[in-house]
Structure formats: structure tokens, C-alpha cells
Image (cartoon, rainbow, N blue to C red):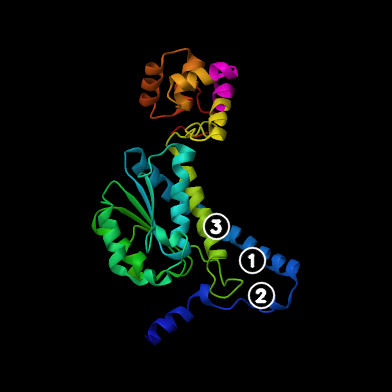
Amino acid sequence: MDDPRLHELLRGLVTESRNPRTTRIDRLDALGILRLLHAEDRSVLDVVEAALPAWSEVVDEVADRFARGGRLFYVGAGTSGRLGVLDAAECPPTYSTSPDRVVGLVAGGHETLVRSQEGVEDRAEDGAAVVDEHGVGSDDALIALSASRRTPYVLAALRRARERGAWTCFLACNEIDAPTRALVHRAFEVVTGPEAITGSTRMKAALAQKMMLTMLSTAVMVRTGKVYGNLMVDVAPTSQKLRERAKGLVMDVAEVDYAAAADQLTRSRDDVKVAIVVGRLDVSVDEARRRLQDAHGRLAKVLGEAAAEGEETP
């Protein structure tokens, strides 16, 4: 169906405009193509860096809700939706979060992760319905992703989440208009410019979104006690590699040998932080769990390690 208004809107988006630096990319050899693409990707770093001060406020907002039992939702369509699902899927094995604590919602459902269905992004009713289906509420945060900033599925999900009392944030790679800003608590324009291949927002726009989401979820996990130093002490040992990694964590932090680390992990039911407290402080498993609970999961606090001068004490 012809839609001149939509046509003009799309032509006005920076992500749909033609990149003057890559107009002759089809004349280059393989190395020339790669160098040109890499140069475009490098420009994304500066754009993301400029957004960090404001993005840190989103981290605090999400961490506060996460710490009190709320959930984090990502919602998007196409590449943006797949990036949200990917980031959510990485949280359980990396930080032992329940799969329902960080949730990725993508237009068309999980089938679109392996087979693109571009038309599903236009189904606004599906965006509202999926928010209702997951019972998004006042303790939750919902971050919507859209390179273009006009995706009907995403905007409908945002509107419904706001109606249900959730804290909402919109991350787009184009200028966000006033009506859309009115839907959300925070709006972010991470404008990465024209793509190397015109309109292919799986490139620079997606790279920016991937970076922002990875930093967000990582910072939230750090802020909520799932990291000790720079160690993933809440890792879920669900594979042979991760079981050995868990033993190594206990050995290093609790300062015990391999056999003791394995024994402490077994007694702690594979809870790395509990095993560390048992080994380091020579207390029972139940006492270790109690101390961690009292410290809101912050291992450094349980181990009596005060913050260094100039460091923030959460």
C-alpha cells in the first residue's frame, strides 16, 4: 500500500540518508571495504561516549528497581529486538539471574531471532499485548529500542508500559519527536549518522545499541552486588568450563586449594559467593548465606573490605 507520508518520514531519517564517505564502496577490493566499514564503526565510539553521563542515570534507575525485586525489559523489532533478547539471554549464565528478571521482547516473538519477519514491526497491537502478557508494572523498567524512532510495535509497547506504571526509556538513533518524548521518562538520541550501506541499521546503529545495552546490564549487575572486584562471582556453573571457572574464583578469593574449593562449592550448592565466604571466614553455609543476605549480596562488605578513598560505597 502506498504511503507518501511514511515515505517522506523515512527519507528524513539520518539512518536512511546516503553516506558520502562510502558512495564508491562497490569499487573497492575486500581490504578496502573492510577499512571503510571499520572507519565508520570507530565513529560510533565517540557518539556512545557522549551519552554516558546521562546513561549512568538510567543505570541507577534500573539498578534501584532491580534491587527491590523489579524487572528489566527490552523491547524492539528486527535487529534492535534481537539485540535486546541477546543481552537478556546472557544475564542468567553470567550473573545467575532468573530468566524472568531481564527479559527481551521482540516483535514477532522468538521465531524472528532466526528468521526475519520485517512486517511484524508494524503491529502496534502486538506491542501493547506483550506488555500486558508479562504483567509489566510499577516496579519494572522498560527500555525500548528503535533505530528509526518510529516503529509502531515499539511505540505501542512504550505507551502501554507507561500506562501500567513502569519506568520507561527510549533509545533511538534518530532525533526523537515531541509526542514520543511525552511517552517516556527518559529519551536518548544516539545518532550514529548515515550507514555505510544506506539504511542498513544492523551496522552502526546496531553497534551503538549493543554497546549501550551491554554496558547497562553489566553496570546494573555491578551495582547490585553481582561482581566482586572485576570477578563474576555470581556466575552460574552450568557447564564444565563454568564449573572450573567457579572453582578458580573460590580458590583465588577464598585463598584455598582446588580440593577445598570443589568441596565448598558442593556444600554451597554451586553458589560461588557462599563458597567464598565459607572458605574465607570459616563459617557454615547457612551463616554465609545469612551474612550475604544482610549485605544485599555484596561480597566485599561481607569480607570486611572497606571502600578505598575516593570510591563510592553503595
Image quadrant where residue 25 sits: bottom right
**N-term mark: 1 or 2:** 2
Q: Which mark is residue 48?
A: 3
The residue positioned 28% from the left and 67% from the top of the image is: 125
Q: Is residue 144 visible?
A: no
The amino acid type, in three-letter code, at marker 2 is Thr
Mark 3, secondary structure of its residue: helix
Q: Circle 2 is placed at which residue position? A: 22
Contact? badges 1 and 2 (CB < 8 Å): yes
Inter-mark Cα distance, 1 to 2: 9 Å
Q: Main secondary structure of the magenta part?
A: helix
Q: Residue furthest top?
A: 282
Q: Circle 1 is placed at which residue position? A: 40
Q: Which residues are magenta?
A: 249-261
Residue 140 in the image: x percent, y percent? 31, 48
The amino acid type, in three-letter code, at marker 1 is Glu
Residue 210 in the image: x percent, y percent? 52, 56
The amino acid type, in three-letter code, at marker 3 is Val
